[in-house]
Structure formats: structure tokens, C-alpha cells
Image (cartoon, rainbow, N blue to C red):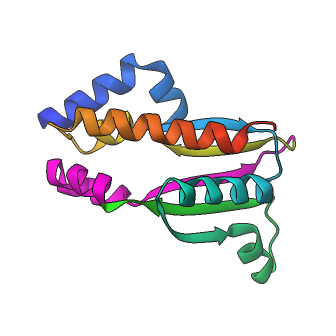
Amino acid sequence: MRPSIFVFLLALLFSAPLAATEGMIDVQSAHSVAATADRLESILADKGMNVFARIDHAAGAKKAGKSLPPTELLIFGNPKVGTPLMQCSRSIAIDLPQKALIWEDDSGAVWISYNDPQYLKLRHNTQGCDEVLKKVAGALGNFARAAAAAE
């Protein structure tokens, strides 16, 4: 077994939050999906992030004759942060730019979900970028909490 796979499997076994969420962080929102996505998009733009796309999966489902509770995806990033990550581990580019999923669960609760940077570190055996990953984790958490917060 390759060492990187072994480390990843050990992390899955001994890290309950990682295993329980499969590398995702979920933040409950006090707003609807559309309002949360609007708030997050505005926060990202204010912080200098490039918002590359906003995808309304429920609208796509409707066009296909299917139904889906409100579900939107924001794709965003900043090359000043993403490039150093890719320099540490080229394969991490498959998970960049960053994504935030804003979705409504079966009980009507709204969530912002995003990839845990520590999960990406393990997934891509990223070494030498701990400070950048720490910065990314802090920023993503701040963005999500601000967009989800009641006013």
C-alpha cells in the first residue's frame, strides 16, 4: 500500500469528524438558500474573491422534468491563494477553485457545505502548505458563518 493511501486510511479511522462528514464542513444558515447564496456571493466579492459561477441545481432539475429542493453551488477562488496550494500538490487543482454548496435538507433547514482543507491535504498528500491551508480554513469558515448568520 502506498504511504499516502495508508496515511489517508489512518486519518479516516481515527478522525471522527472527518469520517462522519467525509471531508465536508456544514454550517447551518438562518436564511433561505437563495438569500444565503446572495449573502455569500456578496461577502466573497467584498473579500476580493473571484466568483466564477453560481449554479442553481434545482432549476436544472426542473428543466429536466425532475424536482430537487433548493440547491445552489458557488464556485470561487483567488489565484494568490490557490496557486501556492497547487505548487505544493498539483493534484489539488482538481478541487480548486473552491466550492460552496448551499442546500435545503428534508426538514427545511438550510446549510452551507464546503470541503475541509484538512481533508484536501490528506486527499492530495499535500506537504509544505500548512500555513496556506490554515489561512484557507479560517477564511472559508468566516465566509460561511457570515453568510449564515442571523442579522
Q: Residue at x 68, y 45 (%)?
A: 147
Residue 59, position as x, y percentages in the image: 76, 74
Quarter of the image with the C terminus is top right
Residue 86 belongs to magenta span: yes
Residue 87 belongs to magenta span: yes
Magenta region: 80-107
Residue 130, position as x, y percentages in the image: 24, 32
Residue 41, position as x, y percentages in the image: 62, 60
- Quarter of the rendering containing residue 6: top left
Residue 19 located left or right of residue 132: right
Residue 78 located left or right of residue 76: left
Q: Residue at x 77, y 83 (%)?
A: 63
**Which residue is most to the bottom?**
63
Residue 140 located left or right of residue 35: left
Q: Relative to 104, is 109 above or below? A: above
- Quarter of the rendering containing residue 119: top left
Q: Relative to 113, is 47 above or below? A: below
Q: Residue at x 70, y 54 (%)?
A: 39
Residue 134, position as x, y percentages in the image: 34, 32
**Which residue is most to the top?**
14
Q: How many marks?
A: 0
Quarter of the image with the N terminus is top left
- Quarter of the rendering containing residue 124: top left
Q: Residue at x 83, y 45 (%)?
A: 106
